[in-house]
Image: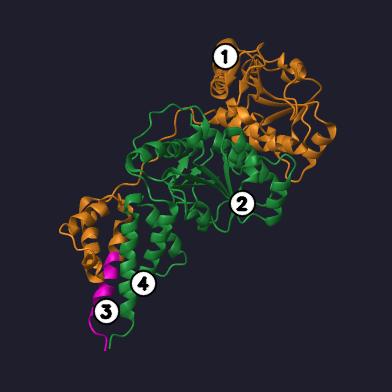
Chain colours: A orange, B green
């Protein structure tokens, strides 16, 4: 995971975005994943105004900064990465998978502390800009020319073009994804053999009382039921309640056998 | 990566979605990542109509199916996974990280071919439903009670609530992300949600008839029992016999209630 200081070094740059909803959606995803710095380049003026004034517009949106060109928006970053849906077109640039790209970006974001300690370098040396183009055309060649390399979300051939807000969400998620895998969730502890056997035995009583075993008389019915219960992989936490369920059923079945009147 | 046949086994289920743009966005992300089957449960009618008739509405949207309840929408799936933004609230269910959860879902989606070859199991046994709740409230407790476990996108404490379309995109991306893990050997084919629900419903009848539920009257007893049964991970091969067991018990309990003489 990235530290707050590392998260703080990313700049999300939206170039020529048309739809205010997409600017808002990008800001929301940034807020979800802990990124604070949004930059917009030549947005359709109305779109940016509308996004900023929307009800519930986030802090990210409130402090978003506007630039006249991609060059200005990335000027203080040491790594500039473009995003694209296209597989083969941009031969000018190295094209990386989202996973590989995110790994390199994380590495750069992390280099800050080390760099500053060693060389007293300014924060800019570990600042990364991540560029997203317009909904319709993506990044223009001029924008691309400021990028060190491009990153591609692995969409299907049949429909490579993602919604802008969703593309931002997916890229940021990949950046913050638990690189060292989260501790594996322990399956719940299984019931002990003794507990399982008590339950089996109570179930067998219920089956006898209910006439279930009469209907299908087989020599090894007890063993079959025993295997049936074991295939359930009963969790320990539930052993008591299952035992209670079958005990109550047996009690009720037994009571009803004695004539009532 | 998942094969087309594996991708085809996922059902994306949107429960009580309000905003047509979100239904459209979910469909778009599905199309981007190669998933085809969208199910909507109790959408705001106008929202679903509007989403479907939108310009450029995709093939995914055109063949989306509408259901009256989460139970019906997941009936033919053997693994039902809910998504949540919450970290600690739903203590009733195992909560997995998106990465761990996606790994388990992929494993189930992949189990199809192997299972069918071995046991002639129907496709349903490797079908997975992935549930997303409403924009405002997420999944309701009743929807959650049909889930085997929950999955959480790692959002920041400060803003955990994602836009629905972005949440769908991130989850589906994580599912298709290139991971080459050795396919884990599935033990035995699990029962479908419909089978599990039939068994649950028969068990509930038995609990009522036996007086078990009277002894511990709690508001959400049905949901508790539903979760109890899902924790068993019932194998498909045993579904019929468990149903038969509870049916026989219910029949016997019911008969004994009417006076005998």
**Mark 1, secondary structure of its residue:** helix
| 2 or 4: tag closer to the N-terminus | 2
Q: Residue at (29%, 48%) from the top-left corner?
A: A190
Q: Nearer the viewer, residue A225 or A77?
A: A225
Q: Position of residue B8 (x, y in %)?
A: 51, 39
Residue at the disc numbered 2: B134
| Chain of the residue under the numbered disc 4 shown in the image | B
| Tags 4 and 1 touching, CB below 8 Å | no
Q: For residue A53, what is the image quadrant? A: top right
Q: Residue at (38%, 73%) from the top-left corner?
A: B214
| Crowd around label 4: few <14 · some 14–19 · many ≥20 (10 Å) | few
Residue at the disc numbered 3: A256
Is A149 placed above or below B95 here? above
| 3 or 1: tag closer to the N-terminus | 1
| Crowd around label 3: few <14 · some 14–19 · many ≥20 (10 Å) | many
The span from disc 3 to disc 1 (Cα, nearest Å) is 81 Å
């Amino acid at each position: 995971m990235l530290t707050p200081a590392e998260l703080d070094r990313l700049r999300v740059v939206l170039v020529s975005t048309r739809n205010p909803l997409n600017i808002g959606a990008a800001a929301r995803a940034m807020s979800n994943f802990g990124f604070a710095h949004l930059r917009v380049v030549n947005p359709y003026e109305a779109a940016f105004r509308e996004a900023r004034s929307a009800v519930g517009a986030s802090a990210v949106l409130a402090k978003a900064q506007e630039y006249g060109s991609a060059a200005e928006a990335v000027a203080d970053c040491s790594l500039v990465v473009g995003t694209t849906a296209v597989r083969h077109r941009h031969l000018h640039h190295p094209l990386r998978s989202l996973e590989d790209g995110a790994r390199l970006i994380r590495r750069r974001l992390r280099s800050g502390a080390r760099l500053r300690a060693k060389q007293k370098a300014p924060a800019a040396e570990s600042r990364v800009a991540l560029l997203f183009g317009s909904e319709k055309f993506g990044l223009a060649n001029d924008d691309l020319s400021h990028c060190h390399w491009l990153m591609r979300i692995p969409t299907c051939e049949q429909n490579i073009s993602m919604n802008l807000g969703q593309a931002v969400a997916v890229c940021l998620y990949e950046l913050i994804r638990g690189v060292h895998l989260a501790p594996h969730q322990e399956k719940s502890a299984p019931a002990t053999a003794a507990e399982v056997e008590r339950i089996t035995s109570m179930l067998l009583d219920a089956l006898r009382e209910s006439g279930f075993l009469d209907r299908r008389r087989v020599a090894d019915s007890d063993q079959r039921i025993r295997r049936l219960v074991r295939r359930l992989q009963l969790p320990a936490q539930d052993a008591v309640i299952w035992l209670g369920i079958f005990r109550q059923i047996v009690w009720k079945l037994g009571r009803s056998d004695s004539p009532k009147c």
